Image: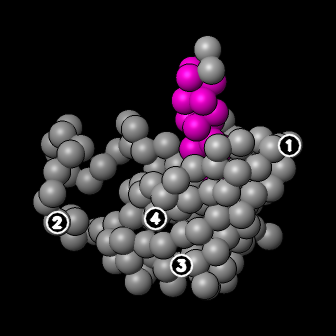
Amino acid sequence: MGVKMSVGNRLAALSLVGLLAAGCSMTGGSSDSSTDEPLAPQGMSATEIRTILAGKSWRFQGPNNTGTTLYAADGSSLVEVDGKGTTKGRWTTKDGQLCESFDPAAFLPGGVPMSCYPFSRGTAPNTYQAGKATFSVAS
């Protein structure tokens, strides 16, 4: 049970910041998500993603949690998960991806190692998708 809780906590943590990538819609018609092909033309560059996120607070809504993340320009982040608490983290970008790690917290005892997820414009105006999470500028 300890192992299941650890894995469950880790998955919950990833969901909590809305970054579970499994099952995300990817560009292209292939169902094989393990490809080294270059980004499709609509893919965002690392610089573009960094410019969008840096210095702003973003509301996220994932499959299991909601909250707010402040993405500081120095690559640090502060995450507040509604009803659970806060944690600090680190973030960076790659072409087409947002990469994040999270420090341990009461609701996230093991923290989360650096993981990368597809990042793209959302379907609603002024929104973005990171894995299964929708991001919008916090008001």
Q: Earlier in the sequence, mark 1 or mark 2?
A: 2
Q: Position of residue 95 (x, y in %)?
A: 32, 72
- Whether residue 64 is visible: yes
- Whether residue 59 is visible: no
Q: Position of residue 38 (x, y in %)?
A: 16, 66
Q: Position of residue 134 (x, y in %)?
A: 57, 53
Q: Is residue 138 left or right of residue 23?
A: right
Q: Earlier in the sequence, mark 4 or mark 3?
A: 3
On the image, numbered disc 4 is attached to which residue? Answer: 98
Q: How are the residues colored? A: one colour
- Magenta range is 3-17
Which part of the image, by quadrant, shows the N terminus?
top right
Q: Earlier in the sequence, mark 3 or mark 1?
A: 3
Q: CA distance from mark 4 to mark 1?
A: 24 Å
Which residue type carries mark 3? Answer: Ile
Q: Earlier in the sequence, mark 2 or mark 3?
A: 2
Q: CA distance from mark 4 to mark 3?
A: 11 Å
Which part of the image, by quadrant, shows the C terminus?
bottom right
| Magenta residues, dominant SS class | helix
Which disc is residue 38 wearing? Answer: 2
Q: Nearer the viewer, mark 3 or mark 1?
A: 1
Q: Are marks 1 and 2 in contact (CB under 8 Å)?
A: no
Residue 34: quadrant of the picture: top left
Q: Earlier in the sequence, mark 4 or mark 1?
A: 1
Q: Is residue 39 left or right of residue 72?
A: left
On the image, numbered disc 3 is attached to which residue? Answer: 52
Q: CA distance from mark 3 to mark 1?
A: 27 Å
Residue at 30% over, 49% down: 26
